[in-house]
Image: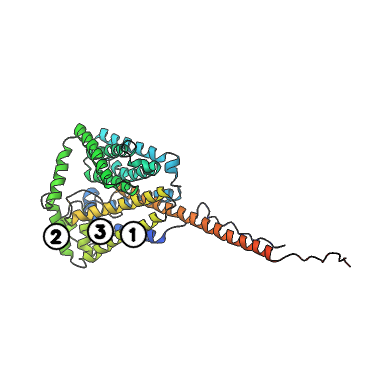
């Protein structure tokens, strides 16, 4: 009798490290690039702040360690728990609570420092919540009462609370992320305009009630959109000076002078100008290419995600990181008015680094689960083929039988 060939159980273990190497390599390159440039850009302001040239850099290393731990946690976490265990709802409620808390205490950050800002956490949480919400609603998102109106309220409340803290760049980012995810989930252009109107009106009402003076910053921002030379022209002129001094290949790492006498906050918002001076057009182009590669690889991961929720999460998170980079770079080279967006992986700042690395962990975790699903499908397919071959062998090799009436000797 033929024997059936059995396959060994090749299910990936719970700690199977199926990592997208190209994506991880790009992130690692950005982190190394960022640490080098941060040390160069921050030693002077660090000295003036604490009489220690290494204090800002060491603080960033501490936040990097925390961010890597957060990335590892989300990497091994099943992203479906955001939906099944209502973690996304708890996260958005907790974030709104933190935004209200900093509003009450009158600061943009918690614990009396500038590194713990709920507005940075809100960008990550809004992507997670909207991805879960839009995936659960399905085609219902196109209905005004079940989709557009509730989503407009969500975006309006979160963005309004952030704008009250005068963090307009974060508020705009929340709006953009919400509209992008709605479009990816199947929304039309007309519905997007309706959603934008609803959320903008609600956000404006919140701002008008609590801090009407914020409207001056909004007006300044739109004036800058119409005429880039009107708002923030001094900072842009200083950034251009740094780029001109850098030329094609820069003056050398650590040898720039713009960070000492020209640029405001060279270790945060203006760090791209420091890169332009010290590494030149060539070095700045390498950074831009790294962000472009991050977007490209992220979209590949989103395409092969196991389901719609995974695709929305990956696409939203990758777009958020690259959008932040685009705004920061566009401000420095004069394409946008001053917005205050950090440069992801590069600028000094604990909250931004931790939430960005958390997003990286979620992205790689979704790709890990996609790889697990792919391996299971391959094993089932191979098992079916082997099983069919076993059946064929049993059918093609008949048993020996004696002719009727023949006696055994």
Q: Quadrant of the N terminus?
A: bottom right
Q: Quadrant of residue 23?
A: bottom left
Residue at the far front in the pictured view: 404
Q: Does the CB distance between marks 3 and 1 fall below 8 Å?
A: no
Q: Mark 3 Cα within 10 Å, few/some/many (few <14, many 20+)?
A: many
Q: In this figure, which residue is indicated by the disc labeled 2? A: 241
Q: Is residue 5 above or below residue 72?
A: below
Q: Mark 1 Cα within 10 Å, few/some/many (few <14, many 20+)?
A: some
Q: Residue at (23%, 34%) from the top-left corner? A: 206
Instruction: Calculate the distance from the C-alpha at mark 3 to the C-alpha at mark 1.
Output: 29 Å
Q: In this figure, which residue is indicated by the disc labeled 3? A: 40
**Marked residue nearer the N-terminal end (3 or 2):** 3
Q: Residue at (25%, 54%) from the top-left corner? A: 326
Of badges 3 and 1, nearer the viewer stands 1
Q: In this figure, which residue is indicated by the disc labeled 1? A: 296
Of badges 3 and 2, nearer the viewer stands 2
Instruction: Calculate the distance from the C-alpha at mark 3 to the C-alpha at mark 2.
Output: 18 Å
Give the camera-side residue of 371 and 359. Answer: 371
Q: Is residue 187 visible?
A: yes
Q: Is residue 74 left or right of residue 383?
A: left
Give the camera-side residue of 130 and 308. Answer: 308
Q: Is residue 347 left or right of residue 77?
A: left
Q: Mark 2 Cα within 10 Å, few/some/many (few <14, many 20+)?
A: some
Report the coloring of the rendering. rainbow
Task: Label 1, secondary structure: give it.
Answer: helix
């Amino acid at each position: 009798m033929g024997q059936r060939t059995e396959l060994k159980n090749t299910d990936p273990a719970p700690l199977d490290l199926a990592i997208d190497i190209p994506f991880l390599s790009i992130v690692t390159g950005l982190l190394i690039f960022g640490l080098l440039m941060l040390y160069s850009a921050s030693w002077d302001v660090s000295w003036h702040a604490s009489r220690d040239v290494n204090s800002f850099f060491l603080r960033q290393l501490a936040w990097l360690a925390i961010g890597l731990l957060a990335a590892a946690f989300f990497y091994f976490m099943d992203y479906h728990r955001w939906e099944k265990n209502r973690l996304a709802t708890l996260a958005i409620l907790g974030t709104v609570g933190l935004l209200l808390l900093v509003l009450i205490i009158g600061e943009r950050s918690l614990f009396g420092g500038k590194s713990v800002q709920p507005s940075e956490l809100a960008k990550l949480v809004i992507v997670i919540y909207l991805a879960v919400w839009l995936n659960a609603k399905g085609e219902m998102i196109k209905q005004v009462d079940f989709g557009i109106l509730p989503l407009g309220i969500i975006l309006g409340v979160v963005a309004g609370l952030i704008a009250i803290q005068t963090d307009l760049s974060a508020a705009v980012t929340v709006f953009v992320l919400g509209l992008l995810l709605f479009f990816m989930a199947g929304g039309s252009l007309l519905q997007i305009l309706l959603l934008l109107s609803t959320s903008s009106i609600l956000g404006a009402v919140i701002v008008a009630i609590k801090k009407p003076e914020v409207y001056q910053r909004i007006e300044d921002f739109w004036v800058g959109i119409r005429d880039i030379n009107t708002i923030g022209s001094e900072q842009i002129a200083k950034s251009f000076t740094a780029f001109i001094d850098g030329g094609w290949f820069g003056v050398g790492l650590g040898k720039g002078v713009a960070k000492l006498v020209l640029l405001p906050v060279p270790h945060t918002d203006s760090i791209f100008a420091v890169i332009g001076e010290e590494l030149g057009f060539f070095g700045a182009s390498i950074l831009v290419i790294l962000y472009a590669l991050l977007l490209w690889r992220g979209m590949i991961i989103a395409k092969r995600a196991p389901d719609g929720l995974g695709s929305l999460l990956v696409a939203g998170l990758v777009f958020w990181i690259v959008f932040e980079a685009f705004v920061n770079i566009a401000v420095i080279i004069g394409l946008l008015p001053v917005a205050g967006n950090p440069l992801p992986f590069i600028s000094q700042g604990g909250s931004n680094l931790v939430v960005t690395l958390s997003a990286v962990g979620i992205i790689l975790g979704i790709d890990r689960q996609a790889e697990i699903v792919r391996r299971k499908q391959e094993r089932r397919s191979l098992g079916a083929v082997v099983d069919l071959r076993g059946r064929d062998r049993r059918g093609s090799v008949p048993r020996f039988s004696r002719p009727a009436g023949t006696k055994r000797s």
